[in-house]
Structure formats: structure tokens, C-alpha cells
Amino acid sequence: MSRSKPLLALAAFVVSLGVAALLITGGIGGTRSTVHPIASSSPTTVVATVCPAQQIRLLGFINDCAGTLRRAPAGRSAPDGCRVSGRFLDASILLQGRADEYLLYVEVDGAYVGPGDYSLPPWPNPSFHSDDGVAKVAIRDYTTGDFWWSSFGVLTVSRNDGRSGLVTGDLEFAGGEPHPLPGLNISGAWSCG
């Protein structure tokens, strides 16, 4: 009988863990929840970031929802926009978050074949426009200049003109001052407007 109490406690824990997993994931065959916990400075506080359908969720060092800004703020130049030329897709998109602005860079460099999914492997070169056949996504904080680039994920191009799609991926810190920062996870819709 002395072994039955620990086994019963273990069985109860496993069942409760399974029930919690079903609730979080929406059950068997259910859809993914759009609410994701965000780590904060307090280990007991959990904040959920849910973004509208036409925005990108930034989660990690930055916790924000950002959508395409139709024109540059006063005193700032607009990014170049979207260009498709042969095997190249190149987009620079100004995003407006709740309080900050970001530049989203989307590039399929030498391997663009039209609408579809493009894998986001770690960057093979430390720059854009390197004709390396790799899809790339990056975020720059417009104010600080801090920069994160894709290390894993999927870039989806949904239109023939290469002007919109979806992105889901992990980004690692790639530059800025004064010290390395934690990474970002991004997911959501992008559009050149």
C-alpha cells in the first residue's frame, strides 16, 4: 500500500497535465489558440498579446502589435516599398505599433518563383541583396535602430505581385547598441499597402 499513494498522485498529475494541454491547444483536431503568454520581469505575471488579423505580433524583447503605416510620419522618409524582379522579391514596410514604429524587411533573394511558402533558415550572409537563394525577414526598431533577423520560420507570399502574405518565425538580435538583446518571435500578415 505504501507505493499506491505516490502512483495515485503521479496519475492525477498526468491527467491534469493532459486536460490543461487540451484546453490550451483547443482539443484534438482543434485550432491553435491565438493567445500566447509573454514572459515578463515578474515570474508570476503572464500577459497575453492578441493582435488584429492584419497586423504582425512581435513577441519577446518587444511585445507589440504592428500594422502597415500608409505614409511616413512627418520628418521621416518612407521605406522603398515592394519590388519583384525576376527571381527577387524585396520589400521594406513601415509598421506602426501601439507606441513605436518598426521597419519590416522581407526578401527572397535569388529564389523567388511567385506566391507560396519560403523557408526562413538562419542568414548565410550578414547583409541583404546577396543573391544567395535564401528568404529573409528582419525587424528594425525605427527609433533605436536595434535589428533582428530571421533564424527560423516561414514566409508566405499570397499574391502574384509579391505585395502581401504571412510570416511566422524566430528572429535573433543582429545589431544595435549598447549590448545584445533577446530575440523576437513574429507572426501575422504583412502588406505593402
Image (cartoon, rainbow, N blue to C red):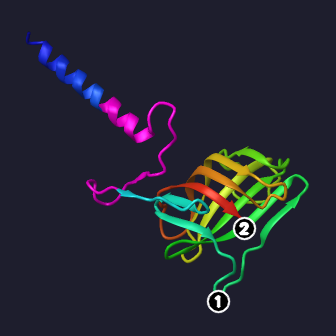
Residue linked to disc 1: 74
Judging depth in this view, the residue of 126 and 119 nearest the camera is 119
- Residue with the most extreme top position: 1
**Residue 26 picture location, percent across and down:** 44, 39
Q: Quadrant of the C terminus?
A: bottom right
Residue stretch in magenta: 17-46
| Residue 102 vertical placement versus 122 (above, below) | below
Asked if residue 27 is among those painted magenta in the image, a careful observer would answer yes
Q: CA distance from mark 1 to mark 2?
A: 18 Å
Residue at 83%, 47% (x, y): give it: 111
Question: Above or below — where is 22 with respect to 124?
Answer: above
Reading the chain from its start, which is encountered first: label 1 or label 2?
Answer: 1
- Quarter of the view holding residue 76: bottom right
Q: Secondary structure at mark 2?
A: strand
* Above or below, comparing residue 79 to residue 15 in the picture: below
Task: Locate residue 53, reporting x and y percent.
Answer: 58, 59
Q: Secondary structure at mark 1?
A: loop
Question: Is residue 9 shown left or right of residue 152?
Answer: left
Would residue 31 be counted in the magenta stretch?
Answer: yes
- Circle 2 residue: 92
Q: Amino acid at mark 2?
A: Ser
Residue sitting farthest toward the left = 2
- Disc sitting over residue 48 in the figure: none
**Disc 1 residue type?**
Ala
Few, some or many residues within 10 Å of mark 1 (<14, 14–19, 20+): few
Q: What type of secondary structure mainly makes up the magenta span?
A: loop
What residue lies at 64% left-to-right and 89% top-to-bottom?
74
